[in-house]
Amino acid sequence: MFEKILIANRGEIAARVIDTCRRLGVRTVAVFSDADRDARHVAMADEAVHIGGARPAESYLRGDILIAAARETGAEAIHPGYGFLSENPDFVEAVTAAGLTFIGPSARAIRAMGLKDAAKALMEGAGVPVVPGYHGANQDAGHLAGAAETIGYPVLIKAVAGGGGKGMRLVERAADFAAKLDSARGEAETAFANPAVLIEKFVQKPRHIEMQVFGDGTRAVHLYERDCSLQRRHQKVIEEAPAPGMTDAMRAAMGQAAVRAAEAIGYAGAGTVEFIVDASEGLRPDRFWFMEMNTRLQVEHPVTEAVTGIDLVEWQLRVAAGEPLPARQEEIPLRGHAFEARLYAEDVAAGFLPATGRLTHLKFPPGARAETGVRAGDTISPWYDPMIAKIITHGPTRDIALTQLAAALDATEVAGSVTNLAFLSALARHEGFRRGDVDTGLIARDIDRLTADAPPGLALRALALIGAAGLQDGGGALAGFTLWAPLMRRVALEGLAGLIEVPAPDRVRVTIGEEVADCRLQAGGWWVNGRPAGARIVLTPGRVSVFGGGAHHFDVTDPLARATDAGGGGLTLSPMPGLVKAVFVAAGQAVAAGDRLAVLEAMKMEHTLSAARDGRVAEVLVAPGAQVEAGAALVRLEEEGE
């Protein structure tokens, strides 16, 4: 076993690897950019090395600096985590040439699976079923449009070097193909420096089921499947293992195909073979097709660990250190059911735009596994993926594990940034999802219901005003004392106001319009109108948060506008810090509602900003290549009637 390794990554995956290394007695070296100087993974590691600026290209994507840091600190191996350089074969070769061990597959194996079109051809040769599509080298727009017509709409345009939903567009009719192709190519060029695409048939009731594989370079095993069908914009939201409705015949067929795929390229380490499944007639062994292989550890690997009891990071270290596979196929157990929910800093109401902010409060429930790279007080940076944590639950049955997940999400407390927590809670309680009737279109079909903002009840509103009055710990010994009557005062928050009366140290009466809440602080917390509220009041700068059965946040003052449109529809603002990739309009140009104004690149994704109304452009306030802050004015339309 290694004595010391360097982790060429950041955030929750770096912290996850450190956890296993600590258990095995392996010392760790963390690396950090300017933005991560005080990050959790840096504090956890035995040593830490500064590697450059906040931009990934200046730090986490600098293979030469990472290798130099490993050599200078005496690390014997490099663990890449996922993302950044984890699937870069040139980096693997450089690590090996430096006399270090890369904890992962060979450069040859990564190259074999790195381009989707070549990988599909390889899999066909290995007897693995593939989706009908065009995977050729001819990238002429007319030729690709003809291929789409031959395959039959709807089709998916996918970047050949893609991943994480980037460079991927669904096209449902021929008239939209050219625009979608341009958009996919632009995003692929930005994300992967490779604009090439492939075209695939879009499966009408698709499920995304993947097999976890592990190899030692010669032999491979699978550790069963994960269902990743709950997606929005091709990004996974909640994953589970095993897949609901999975049959023994289907599992055997998929497992054998995944093992054939891994052994065909001499795979070593942890990898995932992803399949698209047609679930229109249930799960059938003849209705699954190879999509791609991820030659690294997956974000969702904890659900596999939960149902097998196997630490995949430990296996990575052991095999990279020269050990054979730690178990035979028949020795790998499958016990119970597990879920993972991805908690992000993102503005659901604004179309799931990535968000930033300082996490003024962060608390995870003790009964769930929470993997995170941040702590209370940390800042969500615009330079990296805005994931806050992964919440994982495991139970003896699917129903129990999903009930645990819903409870864990309700008990998770985050303040300081907008998050998708309420969305995840709604999804965990979705009737179809609870029945196991899932496919990749579920979220899009029910997006309005899943993102509906349920107003807080009287109890939570009353507790918010109690917090605003500074009475979250009770009235105090003299709080109700005046000469002739109980203390009364008016308290206001953004969108909420009421009258506070303190008749006794442990009692607060709150009047909101015609409603009255009689609140008492007891040993177990606040009671409202004779019932336990089951909620906690948390005060952070400029905000009162009430956590209980979800989270509700109330601003002390008017918040800064976060929408992309302001000023009565005349001013388009940047919804987040980012890079202006393109501007499509000029002063004096007429635009219609919905027309593209600009493209902003942030959080490794492209975001199109559109006109909120018909009008004429008065000013273009930015140029392509400009780095802008959240709230920066980009385009101004003339006032109506001007």
Image (cartoon, grey):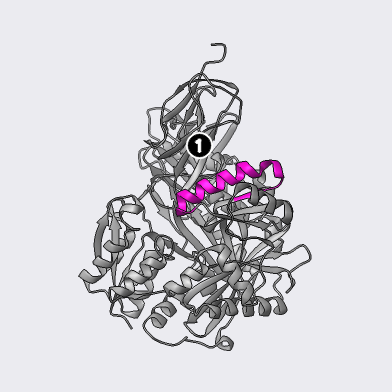
Q: What main secondary structure does the magenta stretch of the protein show?
A: helix
Is 265 on the left or on the right of 241, as rendered?
left
* Residue situated furthest left in the rendering: 72
Residue 18 position (above or below residue 612) = below
Q: How many marks?
A: 1
Q: Position of residue 422 (x, y in %)?
A: 56, 49
Q: Tag 1, which secondary structure?
A: strand
> Picture quarter containing residue 457?
top right
Residue at which label 1 appears: 509
* Quarter the N terminus occupies: bottom left
Give the residue drawn at x 24%, y 62%.
Answer: 49
Q: Circle 1: is it few (<14), some (14-19), or many (20+) Cα within 10 Å?
A: many
Residues shaded magenta = 169-194
Q: Nearer the viewer, residue 508 or 561?
A: 561
Q: Nearer the viewer, residue 229 or 410?
A: 229
Residue 124 position (above or below residue 594) = below
Q: Position of residue 102 (x, y in %)?
A: 36, 74
Looking at numbered disc 1 in the image, what kind of residue is underneath it? Arg
The reply to whether residue 95 is visible in this rendering is yes
Give the residue drawn at x 48%, y 41%.
Answer: 553
